[in-house]
Amino acid sequence: MIRVMLIDDVLLLRTALAAVLSNEIDIKVVADLASSDDVAPIAEALRPDVAVIDFDPRGCAALAAARALGLVMPGCGVLALTSVRPAGPVRRLLASTVQGVLGKDTEPCQVAQAIRKVARGDRVIDPALAVAAMLVPQGPLTPRELDVLRVAAEGEPTAEIASRLHLSCGTVRNYISSALRKTGARNRLEAARIADDAGWL
């Protein structure tokens, strides 16, 4: 029997998936959580074989949950369900320790089949998501502009960016101005988001 933990903040989707999986004779949902905050102690107590996690638009919670599970339950496979299409977040997900990635429009029977594969240790990737992540056009930003945006995305001020990248504040401002112009963004954080979504960062 494959023991499954569901993590999705949308109650309707979580309960619907739990109901579908309950019809599978070899799958048992042992937990359905609205948040990944306490995933590690719950996983230790319930010993799931597979965790099915909602991949949020920025991907932070899902990746953090996958890392936490990897520490306390290295044998627990992680299957991410996502509606995210931008190349950057999907590439980040594919590069993580997550064993499976499916679109949220996947048929329920295919989700069950993916759970079985992940439980066996196989990797399962939605072909459409994989192609979208691979077909990233060459970006207009220079390597140094990307370096600046990576640090800017952390919310660091110009002086800290300059210090970390060994640049002058004026040079950092020039790189940011150029990145804003090329991306059409209104500010540095928006420019970093656009670059990340496009798969350039």
Image: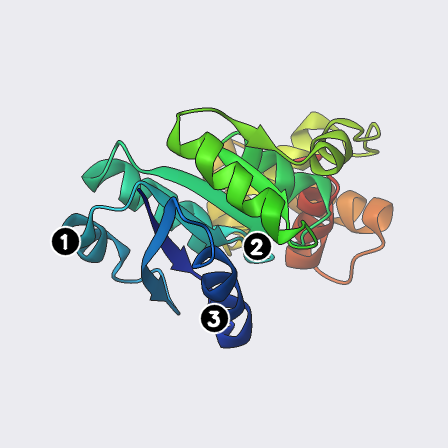
Farthest residue to the front: give it.
Answer: 25
* Quadrant housing residue 126: top right
Task: Report which residue position mark 1 lands on.
Answer: 45
Q: CA distance from mark 2 to mark 1?
A: 29 Å
Above-or-below relation of 87 to 122: below
Q: 140 and 178: which one is in front?
A: 140
Secondary structure of the residue carrying numbered label 3: helix
Amino acid found under the numbered disc labelled 3: Thr
Quadrant position of the C terminus in the picture: top right
Q: 89 and 193: which one is in front?
A: 89
Task: Report which residue position mark 2 lands on.
Answer: 58
Which residue is depicted at the point 56% across and 50% down? 81
Amino acid found under the numbered disc labelled 2: Arg
Task: Report which residue position mark 3 lands on.
Answer: 15
Amino acid found under the numbered disc labelled 1: Ala
In x, y percent, where is residue 72? 19, 41
> Badge 2 local density, few (<14 within 10 Å), some, or many (20+)?
some
> Badge 3 local density, few (<14 within 10 Å), some, or many (20+)?
some
Comes first in the chain, label 1 or label 3: 3
Asked whether residue 125 appears in the rendered view, the answer is yes
Secondary structure of the residue carrying numbered label 1: helix
Q: Nearer the viewer, mark 1 or mark 3?
A: 3
Q: Where residue 123 is drawn, which disc sits there?
A: none
